Image: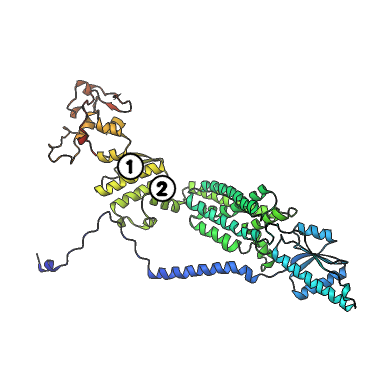
């Protein structure tokens, strides 16, 4: 040994071939970037949810007006001076026309001028507009009092009456139940779409899952809001259908995006519904309060259309709910169409669900999802075999062909793989065809065993019967030649004499006859038929089956 060898530090032990490689730490730059990104997401959420309330102000709010032209002109001047552009007065013939316009949701309220001034409101349409019109009634009362005082008779000022034409339900007098329920409607659609996308693999199966979820969810939602809280009014089953369609209009596009884009579609669908459509839905305030035309645009997204539809069905049966039904139906149909397109792409070889199926398959093979990014040289022998099993079950087969799956593994890892196969058979209902020379592995996994010699099955039966009562000499020879540790001293293992026969020109008769100690002339001349013994499920192709079963201590464990 040289001096260098004598002073060299001891070599580190080689890593165990089946010990998992630890996952590398996240780089510092990525840690900082993730922190900044999460903070940015929080900022976007705050902006999305606070923007409608901060920027809300009435603009061109439609309000009907009936009365003498001179009085109407004076009212318009007064309202413009108080808040320019807030109210858009819509002239109507009389009080009855004003009531009809409110019930059809053409206007939020009405002001009737003439002998007896009256302000008509609809608290069911919006609590915000109800408060605004009530304040307008006070201003109108003050103006009439000033006019009477200027005429020298303050007592002659008429009293302004406030009438709620479409009031809220007595069970929900402030409308908080109806308003608060609209956000869970959106959130429920998002949660349903995300859950279906994560838990169901297959575009068409997701369509069915969304349909079932929406139908059941609509019934549950209306049972809570209408039967329990009384926040909804009107026909129970129509409300349930509207709620179901609203849930489907939110959930179906998410699953459709997933069918086309994979997991990225979940983020796209959720962001679209929660951060874009929900703030402009007009669910908590009239769409006219939103800046620009965002209120009108929001009515064509599922949150806005769903909120409007449920409110119309509950309190405004005379209103035209067609646009809301149409908007929800278009979104639900678009989601189904995207799923069908994704299904066709999948059938053509593009698999947007591959990521979800891959992670699920790795989990079933007892490997974390992070192993999908590893290279073969980063995996141990047992892990590579598990990856191979995961790749096979990702296709959801009914039959799994296993050709020597544990022959290259050590004993401990081999036991783990065999236990995994048994678990997969039980959980997935798999049928496994195991090809192996390891008799112990065969006996551990298989329910039935077929022994093949030179491409011909010579014996087949239940595994326990084949190993404890072999009937073909070749099967008995295989069992006898298996090494065992059941006794401290044993004679040398028996060997099968002779060599393989000519395979190009196979001889007639039994192929094992030249190597069989019990062969007789008949064995060389005629191929033996498969004959059953006492057990009809256990057959052997032998003219003279083995009569003596091996001792149980000699059977491979």
Residue 195 position, x and y percent, is: 51, 53
Which colour style is shown?
Answer: rainbow
- Residue designated by label 1: 402
Q: Is residue 431 visible in the rendered structure shown here?
A: yes
Q: Disc number at residue 289?
A: none
Which residue is at the front of the view, 492 or 168? 168
- Work out whether 133 lies above or below 212: below
Residue drawn at x 87%, y 77% is 149
- Work out whether 119 lies above or below 326: below
The crowd level at tag 2 (other Cα within 10 Å; few <14, some 14-19, many 20+) is some
Position of 426 compared to 527: left or right?
right
Which quadrant: the C terminus? top left
The quadrant where residue 432 appears = top left
Q: Report if the CB atoms under discs 2 and 1 are less than 8 Å apart.
A: no
Q: Secondary structure at mark 1?
A: strand
Measure the alpha-carbon separation of dots 2 and 1. Answer: 15 Å
Residue 353 position, x and y percent, is: 47, 51
- Residue designated by label 2: 394
């Amino acid at each position: 040994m040289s001096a260098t060898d004598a002073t060299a530090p001891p070599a580190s032990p080689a890593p165990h071939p089946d010990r998992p490689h630890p996952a590398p730490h996240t780089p510092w730059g990525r840690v900082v970037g993730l922190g900044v990104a999460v903070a940015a997401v929080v900022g976007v959420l705050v902006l999305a949810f606070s923007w409608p309330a901060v920027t809300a102000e009435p603009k061109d709010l439609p309000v009907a007006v009936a009365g003498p032209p001179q009085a109407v002109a004076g009212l318009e001047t007064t309202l413009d001076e108080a808040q320019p552009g807030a109210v858009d007065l819509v002239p109507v013939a009389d009080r009855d026309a004003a009531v009809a316009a409110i019930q059809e949701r053409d206007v939020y309220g009405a002001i009737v001028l003439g002998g007896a001034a009256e302000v008509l409101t609809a608290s069911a349409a919006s609590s915000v507009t109800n408060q605004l019109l009530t304040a307008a009634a006070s201003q109108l009362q003050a103006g009439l009092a000033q006019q009477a005082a200027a005429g020298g008779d303050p007592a002659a000022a008429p009293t302004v009456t406030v009438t709620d034409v479409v009031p809220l339900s007595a069970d929900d007098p402030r409308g908080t139940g109806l308003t608060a329920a609209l956000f869970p409607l959106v959130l429920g659609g998002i949660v349903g779409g995300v859950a279906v996308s994560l838990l169901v693999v297959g575009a068409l199966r997701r369509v069915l899952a969304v349909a079932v979820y929406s139908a059941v969810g609509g019934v549950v939602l209306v049972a809570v809001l209408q039967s329990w809280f009384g926040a909804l009014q009107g026909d129970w089953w129509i409300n349930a259908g509207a709620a179901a369609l609203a849930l489907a209009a939110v959930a179906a596009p998410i699953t459709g995006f997933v069918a086309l884009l994979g997991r990225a579609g979940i983020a796209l669908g959720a962001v679209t519904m929660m951060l874009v459509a929900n703030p402009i839905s007009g669910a908590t305030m009239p769409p006219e309060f939103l800046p620009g035309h965002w209120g009108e645009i929001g009515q064509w997204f599922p949150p806005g259309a769903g909120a409007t539809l449920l409110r119309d069905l509950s309190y405004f049966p005379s209103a035209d709910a067609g646009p809301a039904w149409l908007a929800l139906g278009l979104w639900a149909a678009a989601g189904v169409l995207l799923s069908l397109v994704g299904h066709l792409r999948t059938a053509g070889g593009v698999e947007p669900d591959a990521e979800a199926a891959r992670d699920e398959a790795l989990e079933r093979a007892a490997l974390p999802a992070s192993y999908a990014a590893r290279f073969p040289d980063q995996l141990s022998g047992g892990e590579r075999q598990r990856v191979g099993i995961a790749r096979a079950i990702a296709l959801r087969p009914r039959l799994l062909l296993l050709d020597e799956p544990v022959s290259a593994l050590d004993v401990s890892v081999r036991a783990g793989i065999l236990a995994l196969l048994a678990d997969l058979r039980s959980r997935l209902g798999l049928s496994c065809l195991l090809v192996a020379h390891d008799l112990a592995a065969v006996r551990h996994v298989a329910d039935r065993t077929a022994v093949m010699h030179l491409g011909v099955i010579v014996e087949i039966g239940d595994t326990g019967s084949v190993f404890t009562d072999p009937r073909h000499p070749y099967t008995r020879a295989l069992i006898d030649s298996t090494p065992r540790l059941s006794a401290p001293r044993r004679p040398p293992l028996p060997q099968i004499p002779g060599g393989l026969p000519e395979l190009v020109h196979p001889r007639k008769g039994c192929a094992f006859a030249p190597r069989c100690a019990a062969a007789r002339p008949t064995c060389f001349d005629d191929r033996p038929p498969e004959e059953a013994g006492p057990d009809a499920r256990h057959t052997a192709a032998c003219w003279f089956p083995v009569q003596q079963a091996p001792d149980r201590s000699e059977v491979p464990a």
